[in-house]
């Protein structure tokens, strides 16, 4: 029940409440009507009993159909002194007769021969030697009560159905502002112009909820903006000191005359400076992409030349690790992209392949239905099944990444650059081997992000 939509639960609650109300009302009306009808029958019996007792004639005061009512005058020993409806036998038993003869009034319901349906019987003592017995069929009362039950049986479900439909309509109308907020929430972002949730005109609980959520959005935007500015400023400020440190270390290397251990340490320092510089650049790209203003200047590029440039950049590093870098590109394939940003994205993919993959690394390009697919694949173990769904998130790292270093920003940069081009980046297949594909337009679109 708790998994059903709120409007369905509200409708079910209204229907249940309606059933309970109708049941309680039906029982009350039934018992009240039964009591009133029985009271009317008793009043008629008392009047007729009084008339028979006064005259001593069984047919005195008769107003009903003989088949529906009767009267008897019983003498000593239960002898029938007078009767209607051809009742030759006494209606009362000897015990009941003795009870009435002792001065006690008797009122019972029983089947009486010659009288339709159950009869209500009243017996009183008329004199020391006579007992008056009068009765009336309860057929009319029972038919009236049966008609009432039938009316509730037919009208009750209809009333419950109408109440349910009305309740569903009311619940839908009441939840319409919530649904509007839900639809708008799917479009709201943390950017300054990301919008806010719509508020209903009525100053009710839903409006107060919307106001609270809008205030929360404002706080999140302010926090996100502070974080974005910090990342952008920090990455920008890091670039200069890192470049200075790298230049000094390279100068020391060129001077020569170092022990092997010292030279190895200086080479490692240069590599770490490169990593810090790349990290600062990656953070800056992410900060700009989060702001929605990642600068992209699209040009028509030859795919093979682009991939060859990336291969040459990583050729020495691949050779040091005994890995092959191969370019597989169809002839004449061109792609519309920013060369600097695209080289950065492909470089991140190649870096990931060299760092975490195995075997040869292949850079490929092929035309596909108005778009171009650029891929980087290797022959390693591929992506972990747990990591793959969140591989393009920032700082997403698997156990292999922790063992081999890395900040978990490489694929996030790839996705940010692809989205800035209006393109997509995705993992194709789950191994063996890792294959990441960037799908870009073949021609320069009319609209692009610009500086």
Image (tube, rainbow, N blue to C red):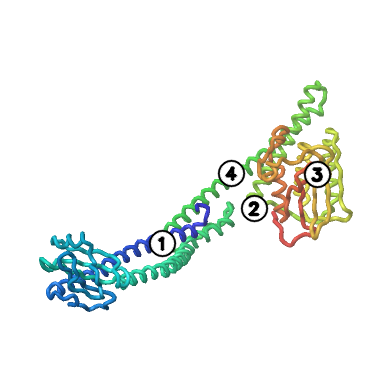
Residue sticking out furthest to the top: 259
Q: Is residue 405 visible?
A: yes
Disc 3 versus disc 2: nearer the observer:
3
Give SS at disc 4.
Answer: helix
In-front residue for pair 421/132: 132
Residue 222 % position (x, y):
54, 48
Q: Tell me residue 135's x, y (percent).
A: 24, 70
Residue under label 3, please give it.
377
Tag in front: 4 or 1: 1
Dot 2 falls on a residue whose secondary structure is: loop
Q: Earlier in the sequence, mark 3 or mark 4?
A: 4
Q: Residues within 10 Å of mark 2 (few under 14, many from 20)?
A: few
Work out whether residue 156 or residue 392 is closer to the camera in this orientation and state it.
156
Give the residue pinned by disc 1.
Answer: 19
Residue of label 4? 227
Residue at point 66% right, 46% down? 286
């Amino acid at each position: 029940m708790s998994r059903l939509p709120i409007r369905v639960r509200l409708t079910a609650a209204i229907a249940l409440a309606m059933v309970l109300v109708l049941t309680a009302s039906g029982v009350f009306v039934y018992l009240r009507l039964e009591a009133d009808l029985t009271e009317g029958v008793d009043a008629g019996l008392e009047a007729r009993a009084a008339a028979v007792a006064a005259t001593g004639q069984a047919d005195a005061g008769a107003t009903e159909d003989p088949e529906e009512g009767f009267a008897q005058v019983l003498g000593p020993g239960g002898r029938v002194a007078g009767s209607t409806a051809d009742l030759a036998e006494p209606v009362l038993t000897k015990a009941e007769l003795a009870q009435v003869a002792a001065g006690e009034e008797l009122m019972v319901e029983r089947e009486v021969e010659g009288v339709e349906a159950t009869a209500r019987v009243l017996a009183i003592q008329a004199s020391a030697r006579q007992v008056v017995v009068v009765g009336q069929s309860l057929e009319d009362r029972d038919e009236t009560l049966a008609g009432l039950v039938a009316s509730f049986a037919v009208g009750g479900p209809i009333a419950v159905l109408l109440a349910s439909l009305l309740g569903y309509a009311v619940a839908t109308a009441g939840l319409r502002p919530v649904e509007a907020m839900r639809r708008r929430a799917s479009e709201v972002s943390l950017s300054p112009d990301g919008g806010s949730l719509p508020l209903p005109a009525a100053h009710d609980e839903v409006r107060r909820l919307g106001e609270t959520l809008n205030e929360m959005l404002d706080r999140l935007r302010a926090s996100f903006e502070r974080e974005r500015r910090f990342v952008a400023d920090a990455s920008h400020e890091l670039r200069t000191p890192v470049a200075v440190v790298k230049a000094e270390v390279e100068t020391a290397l060129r001077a020569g005359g170092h022990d092997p251990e010292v030279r190895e340490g200086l080479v490692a320092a240069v590599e770490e400076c490169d990593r810090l510089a790349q990290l600062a650049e990656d953070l800056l790209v992410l900060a700009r992409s989060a702001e929605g203003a990642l600068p992209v200047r699209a040009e028509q590029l030859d795919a093979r030349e682009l991939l060859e440039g990336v291969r040459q950049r990583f050729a020495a590093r691949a050779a040091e690790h005994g890995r092959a870098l191969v370019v597989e590109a169809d002839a004449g394939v061109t792609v519309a992209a920013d060369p600097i940003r695209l080289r950065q994205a492909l470089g991140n993919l190649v870096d990931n392949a060299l760092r975490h993959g195995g075997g040869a690394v292949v850079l490929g390009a092929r035309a596909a239905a108005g778009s171009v697919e650029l891929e980087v694949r290797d022959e390693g173990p591929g992506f972990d099944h747990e990591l793959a769904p969140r591989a393009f998130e920032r700082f997403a790292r698997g156990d292999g990444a922790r063992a081999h270093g890395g900040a978990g920003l490489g694929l996030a940069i790839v996705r940010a650059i692809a989205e800035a081009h209006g393109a997509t980046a995705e993992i194709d297949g789950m191994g063996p081997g890792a294959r990441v594909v960037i799908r870009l337009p073949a021609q320069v679109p009319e609209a692009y992000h610009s500086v």
